[in-house]
Image (tube, rainbow, N blue to C red):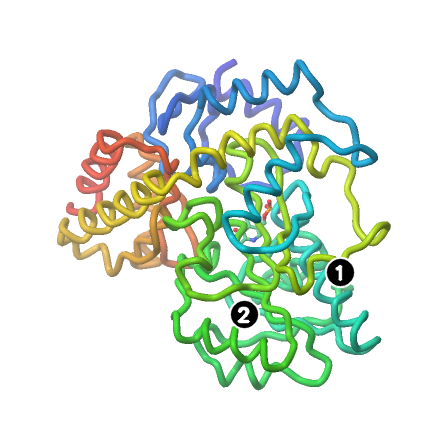
C-alpha cells in the first residue's frame, strides 16, 4: 500500500494520538530505513532510542527465532533461562542487587516508585511516601508517571493524578533540599533529561544529591530508560557519574526493538518487592529476554562502548565544525546528542533534514535530538552530517 492509502485507513481505524510524520516505514537495515514508496533514509532516531543495534540485526533475529521455536511465553509461574541470564548480566555489570522485569519505560518507573514507597513503608510506616522529581523531567504516560514528570503540560485532563510528588530544579541542590520534608522517601531523576531537551545534569549536583539521599535514607531512583543500554557510552549513564543509585529503571534499548523494561535494585533494597507485591503477565517472557541477551552480549563489550563514545565525540566535533550560526550549541553524552537551535526555526530545519533523507528527533522546545543506532557506521554518519550541513549552513 502507498502512504496515502495507508494513511486513509489509519485515520479511520487508529486513534489519532500521535503527530506522525507523513511517511509510512516499510523496512530497515543497519542505520537505514526505506519507506513505502522506496525512499531511503539515514536513521538518527533508532525508533526513539530502541533499535540500538540497528534494524534487521541478525543476532537479535536469530535469538528471537530460536527462542520462539523453543518456548515463546510461559508466564511468571515458572523459571526460564533467558530471563535469569538477562538479570545476571545486568547485575554483574553494575554491582546492583536484583532485577524485576516489565514491558516499557513507564511501567519500569511505576515499579521503581512502588519499590521506593514500600521500602519506606516497611521501615517507617505510613506517611513517608513523597518522591522529589526534577522540573523538565519525563518519566512516562501512566497516571502516576505523568505526575512524576516535572512539566505542567503533562498534568492535564486525567485528574485525579497520583499524589505524592514534589518538584525541584535540576542542578540546584538547595532546591532539592527545599523540596524534601519528613514525608519524602526518594529522589528520582534522569541523569540526562532526554525528552526535556538532552540536558545532562552537573556531576557535582548529582553527587551532592546522592550523598544527601544516603544521609537521610532517601532512595536515589535513576530513570535510565533513555540513557541506559550503552546509549551514553557506558552500559548505564550513572557509571559515568560516579554514583551508585538505589534503583535504576530501563527499557527502550534493552530489547533492541522488542518491548521490555526492567527495574534494578541495589542490595540494600533488592528484597523490598516480595511475592504478591508486584507482577506483570509478560514481564521477563523468554522470547523477549532472548533478544535482550543478544543486545547485552554486544553492548557490554568495552570496545563497543568505546566506539559509542568515539562516534558521539565525532558527531559533536563535526557539527560544531560546520560553524553554522543556526547551531547554538551541541550537548549530550555518547550517541545521545542535542543540537540547540532557535525554537522558531526548528520545525523548518527538521522538515528539511527529513525531506533530504535523514531522520532526526526533537526534544524540549529548541533541540534537535539525535539517538542513532549505536551500531551506526562512519559512512552513515558522514552521509547524515553532509545532509545536515546543507541545511544548517544555508
Ligand atoms: C521514553 C521514556 C520513558 C517512557 O517509556 P515508555 O516505554 O514510553 O513507557 C520514561 N522515562 C524516560 C527517561 C524516557 O525517555
Is 299 left or right of 378, judged from the image as shown? right
- Picture coordinates of residue 185, whole percent (x, y): 69, 74
Q: Secondary structure at mark 2?
A: strand
Q: Residue at x 23, y 33 (%)?
A: 378
Give x and y (percent) for residue 25.
Answer: 47, 24
Residue 272, numbered label: 1
Left or right: 101 with respect to 48?
right
Q: Crowding at label 2, few (<14), some or many (≥20) Cα neighbours within 10 Å?
A: many
Is residue 108 positioned above or below 352 on the image? below
Report how far apart the C-alphas of labels 2 and 1 lie in the structure.
Answer: 25 Å
Q: Determine the image quadrant of residue 254.
A: top right
Q: Position of residue 12 (x, y in %)?
A: 66, 27
Give the camera-side residue of 277 and 149.
277
Q: Residue at x 59, y 74 (%)?
A: 167
In the image, which disc is placed on residue 134?
Answer: 2
Q: Earlier along the polypeptide chain: callout 2 or callout 1?
A: 2
Question: Which is closer to the viewer, label 2 or label 1?
Answer: 1
Amino acid at each position: 500500500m502507498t502512504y496515502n492509502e495507508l494513511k486513509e485507513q489509519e485515520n479511520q481505524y487508529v486513534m489519532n494520538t500521535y503527530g506522525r510524520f507523513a511517511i509510512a516505514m516499510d523496512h530497515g537495515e543497519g542505520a537505514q530505513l526505506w519507506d513505502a514508496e522506496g525512499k531511503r533514509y539515514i536513521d538518527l532516531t533508532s525508533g526513539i532510542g530502541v533499535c540500538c543495534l540497528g534494524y534487521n540485526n541478525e543476532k537479535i533475529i536469530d535469538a528471537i527465532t530460536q527462542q520462539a521455536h523453543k518456548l515463546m511465553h510461559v508466564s511468571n509461574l515458572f523459571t526460564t533461562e533467558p530471563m535469569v541470564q538477562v538479570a545476571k548480566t545486568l547485575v554483574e555489570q553494575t554491582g546492583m542487587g536484583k532485577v524485576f522485569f516489565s514491558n516499557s519505560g513507564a511501567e519500569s518507573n511505576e515499579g521503581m516508585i512502588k519499590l521506593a514507597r514500600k521500602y519506606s513503608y516497611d521501615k517507617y510506616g505510613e506517611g513517608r511516601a513523597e518522591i522529589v522529581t526534577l522540573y523538565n523531567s519525563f518519566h512516562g504516560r501512566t497516571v502516576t508517571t505523568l505526575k512524576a514528570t516535572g512539566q505542567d503540560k503533562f498534568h492535564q485532563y486525567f485528574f485525579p493524578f497520583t499524589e505524592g510528588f514534589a518538584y525541584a530544579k535540576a542542578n540546584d541542590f538547595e532546591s532539592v533540599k527545599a523540596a524534601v520534608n519528613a514525608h519524602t522517601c526518594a529522589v528520582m531523576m534522569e541523569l540526562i533529561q532526554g525528552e526535556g531537551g538532552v540536558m545532562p545534569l552537573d556531576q557535582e549536583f548529582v553527587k551532592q544529591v546522592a550523598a544527601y539521599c544516603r544521609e537521610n535514607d532517601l532512595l536515589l531512583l535513576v530513570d535510565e530508560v533513555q540513557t541506559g543500554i550503552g546509549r551514553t557510552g557506558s552500559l548505564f549513564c550513572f557509571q559515568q557519574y560516579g554514583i551508585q543509585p538505589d534503583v535504576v529503571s530501563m527499557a527502550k534499548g534493552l530489547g533492541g526493538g522488542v518491548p521490555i523494561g526492567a527495574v534494578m535494585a541495589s542490595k540494600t533494597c533488592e528484597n523490598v518487592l516480595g511475592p504478591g507485591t508486584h507482577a506483570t503477565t509478560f514481564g521477563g517472557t523468554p522470547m523477549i529476554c532472548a533478544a535482550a541477551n543478544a543486545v547485552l552480549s554486544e553492548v557490554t563489550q568495552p570496545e563497543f562502548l568505546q566506539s559509542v563514545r568515539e562516534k558521539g565525540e565525532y558527531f559533536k566535533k563535526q557539527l560544531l565544525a560546520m560553524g553554522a550560526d543556526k547551531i547554538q550549541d551541541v550537548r549530550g553524552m555518547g550517541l545521545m546528542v542535542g543540537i540547540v537551535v532557535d525554537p522558531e526555526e526548528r520545525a523548518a530545519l527538521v522538515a528539511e533534514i527529513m525531506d533530504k533523507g535523514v531522520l532526526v528527533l526533537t526534544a524540549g522546545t529548541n533541540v534537535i535530538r539525535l539517538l542513532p543506532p549505536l551500531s551506526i557506521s562512519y559512512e552513515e554518519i558522514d552521509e547524515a552530517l553532509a545532509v545536515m550541513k546543507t541545511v544548517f549552513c544555508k
